[in-house]
Image: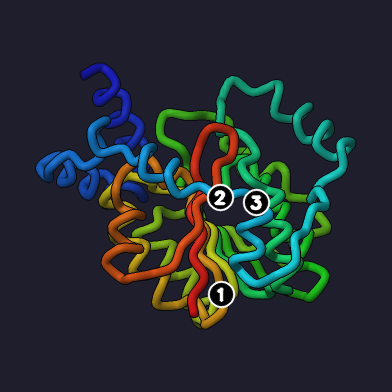
């Protein structure tokens, strides 16, 4: 109850997110599809493959070069260390960088920026081809230090990056319009609730080009990703990284 009150107060101070607040309240009246009994660890574990097998199934050569230098990571972490907020870790940045390199992506969309590690990994690749990354990010509820959103993105990459600071419900459509559809790669790491995924997955998939990739983090959280691939009869790949699962789908 106390946490619900804190969440309400957070929204009341930010009128631009009132529509999102109403959307979240309405979800409370829907069946709970994010409970422990709906988690999909077992399903993911049974289907997990190695990173090398992932590349092989995608029909591309394995790539094993880090997206950042140790020195760069240290500089960014020094900026982060002074903050009381916690926006999470780097995620599977090696996978994102490698796939962007091998597929020579130019039009990339991501949801969920946090410190911007994944953004920087993608940008370090697509900037070589004058590409564009459009990121959608709503500030994390009840956190502070929002000036650190995207702190890992280097100034050299700003030219190739657009950041839309809105919830997925509005920001995703704006990002897709800016890219004019035909996306090379989409990395989903924002509203990972069941209902958030169910809405966004269908929208995203329509705008990925043939041969493009959809990468979704933490697919074990609920059954939304599983339902998406099963209902659409899609070939998919599951990877395990730092105790969590990443789903990868190629659009044939």
| Chain-order first, disc 1 or disc 3 | 3
Q: Secondary structure at mark 2?
A: loop
User: Residue 208 at what x, y percent from top left?
Assistant: 49, 76
- What SS does tag 3 mark? helix
Q: Which residue is pictured at 52% across the width and 81% down the height? A: 209
Observer-side mark, 2 or 1, equals: 2
Q: Earlier in the sequence, mark 2 or mark 1?
A: 2
Callouts 1 and 3 close, C-beta under 8 Å: no
Callout 2: few (<14), some (14-19), or many (20+) C-alpha neighbours within 10 Å? some
Do the numbered discs 2 and 3 sit on residues whose CB atoms are within 8 Å? no
How many angstroms separate mark 2 from mark 1 (CA)?
20 Å
Q: Is residue 12 above or below residue 161?
A: above
The N terminus is located in which quarter? top left
Crowd tier of the residue under label 3, counting other residues whose Cα lies within 10 Å: few below 14, some 14–19, many 20 or above? some
Evaluate whether residue 227 shows in this view. Answer: yes
Q: Nearer the viewer, mark 1 or mark 3?
A: 3
In the picture of the structure, the residue carrying the numbered disc 3 is 51
Coordinates of residue 237 in the picture (x, y in percent):
50, 58
Above or below for 209 versus 186: below
Q: At 39% across and 48% down in the image, what residue appears?
A: 191
Measuring from the top left, give residue 9's x and y in whole percent. Answer: 30, 29
The answer to whether the residues at label 2 and label 1 have Cβ atoms under 8 Å apart is no
Residue 212: give its label: 1
Q: Of residues 250 and 78, which is closer to you in this image?
A: 250
Horizontal side, residue 200 vs residue 218: left or right: left
State the separation of the CA atoms marked 2 and 3: 7 Å
Residue 49 - label: 2
Q: CA distance from mark 1 to mark 3?
A: 18 Å
Based on the displayed image, in which of its 4 quarters is residue 146 positioned?
top right
């Amino acid at each position: 109850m106390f946490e619900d009150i804190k969440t309400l107060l957070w929204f009341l101070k930010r009128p631009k997110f009132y529509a999102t607040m109403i959307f979240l309240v309405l979800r409370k009246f829907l069946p709970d599809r994010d409970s422990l009994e709906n988690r999909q660890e077992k399903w993911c574990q049974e289907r997990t493959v190695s990173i090398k097998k992932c590349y092989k199934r995608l029909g591309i050569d394995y790539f094993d070069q880090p997206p950042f230098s140790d020195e760069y990571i240290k500089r960014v972490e020094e900026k982060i260390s002074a903050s009381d907020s916690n926006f999470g870790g780097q995620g599977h940045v090696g996978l994102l960088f490698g796939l962007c390199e091998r597929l020579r992506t130019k039009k990339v969309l991501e949801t969920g920026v946090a410190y911007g590690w994944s953004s920087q990994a993608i940008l370090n690749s697509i900037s070589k081809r004058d590409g564009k990354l459009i990121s959608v990010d709503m500030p994390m509820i009840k956190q502070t230090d929002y000036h650190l959103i995207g702190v890992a993105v280097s100034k050299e990459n700003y030219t190739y990056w657009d950041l839309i600071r809105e919830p997925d419900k509005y920001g995703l459509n704006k990002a897709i319009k800016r890219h004019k559809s035909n996306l090379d790669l989409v990395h989903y790491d924002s509203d990972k609730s069941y209902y958030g995924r169910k809405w966004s997955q269908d929208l995203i998939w329509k705008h990925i080009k043939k041969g493009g990739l959809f990468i979704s983090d933490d697919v074990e959280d609920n059954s939304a990703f599983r339902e998406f691939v099963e209902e659409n009869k899609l070939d998919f790949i599951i990877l395990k990284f730092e105790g969590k699962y990443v789903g990868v789908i190629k659009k044939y």
